[in-house]
Image (cartoon, helix red, strand yellow):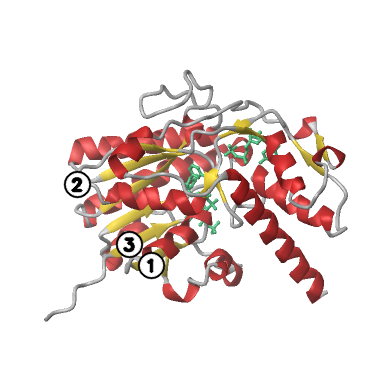
Amino acid sequence: MAATKAPVALITGITGQDGAYLSQFLLGRGYRVIGLLRRSASADVVGERLRWLGVHERVQLVDGNISDLSSLIRVVEAAAPDEVYHLAAQSFVATSWQQPLVTATATGLGVIHLLEAVRIVRPMARFYQASSSEMFGLAAAEPQNESTPFHPRSPYACAKLFGHWMTVNYRESFGMHACSGILFNHESPLRGIEFVTRRITDAVARIHLGLASEVRLGNLDAERDWGHARDYVRAMWLMLQQEIAGDYVVATGRTTSVREFCRLAFAEVGRDWAAHVTSDPARLRPAEVARLRGDARRARQVLGWAPETSLETMVAEMVEADLARHRARLARG
Ligand code: NAP
Ligand code: GDP
């Protein structure tokens, strides 16, 4: 009897938070995982998240850049993927005001680069676009679902909106199986250090170990619907397993302020957040997204998806991981 061929997944942004968790998830389901790696002078450290999850040796990394169409055509041709997960982006909202053109190129145009590469070389492959709740921005309704109007509030959100509609457009124009996942904020011990949750849990660890005494944040009143990245990558995969492609909101339905996140994180080490956190006006953004809360009913009903990790469990996991990182650094001297 002939052995069945393992399905092939191509992931852009494999070195990021979601790319690492998605790789782990897909490897666990028997996929061959190929990831796009952009050239970097620090190539030896960019795979840190994959190493952290113990999957670095099990994925194949190929050279390319989402700003370079010809590199993507070559990668898609060589990988011959069954599923393409487009996660690569300039993903940090605050940076998008400092580098709007880089953001537009990577986060916006990068989506058509990859859609074109797939359409030309591998049109039968299923395509996932990493869209964002930031597209709702100054949200017109609460909770936000697939029908809520968009009102982006940053160059990042504008670029994501472009990518979202291009994904819908390629589905409608060319019949491609292209899905847009409108994911609300999701965090983990592998979240980038510049995002507020990791900034907080990293500060909790440093303060607890006597390496710092305070942390400066921006708007403590901002509220986000925070879930765990491990749960959210499962939703990405479920979208591509449906016979009919579509767009889905992925969220927990619970919103929490930055202030409350601070309280939970400092409580993990028995400390009062108010003694250590200050709000620095210099860290406020030119335009803010004050509050987001998602309605993931469609994902529940059609995909059978539900989040499994509570906010409290995630905060504990993140604080624990940052304590372990700093203890290891201290031990190394
Ligand atoms: P992340 O940790 O910032 O990872 C971004 C990835 O994109 C990294 O692997 C990065 O590579 C890669 N990348 C950036 N520019 C590139 C380029 N020009 N060519 C090739 N690769 C490039 O982001 P994440 O949190 O995993 O998020 C994954 C995706 O979901 C992003 O598109 C993000 O905007 C979107 N999203 C995230 C959230 C969330 O809460 N996490 C919510 C909604 C949507 P390097 O390692 O080389 O920098
Ligand atoms: P975003 O929702 O993708 O922008 O994710 P972030 O984690 O970067 O920000 C979430 C919210 O926290 C936003 O409303 C920020 O304005 C707010 N925030 C408050 N202080 C900080 C800070 O020091 N760093 C970051 N990144 N965000 C902060």
Q: Residue at coordinates 37% horizontally, 36% vertically from top-left?
A: 164
Dots 2, 3 in contact, CB < 8 A = no
Q: Which residue is mark 1?
A: 28
Q: Which residue is mark 2?
A: 243
Which of pointers 3 and 1 lies earlier in the amino acid sequence?
A: 3
Question: In front: 1, or 126?
Answer: 1
Residue 291 horizontal side relative to residue 29, left or right: right
Q: Which residue is mark 3?
A: 9
Dots 3, 1 in contact, CB < 8 A = no
Callout 2: SS: loop
Amino acid of disc 3: Ala
Separation of residues labelled 3 and 1 (CA atoms): 12 Å
Which of pointers 2 and 1 lies earlier in the amino acid sequence?
A: 1
Residue 194 makes an appearance in the image: no
Please state, as top left, top right, bottom left or bottom right, where the N terminus lies in the image.
Answer: bottom left
Q: Residue at coordinates 83% horizontally, 74% vertically from top-left?
A: 333
Amino acid of disc 2: Glu
Amino acid of disc 1: Gly
Q: Residue at coordinates 20% horizontally, 42% vertically from top-left?
A: 244
Indicate yes or no: mark 3 CB to ligand 1 under 8 Å: no
Q: Which mark is residue 56?
A: none
Q: Residues within 10 Å of mark 2 (few under 14, many from 20)?
A: few
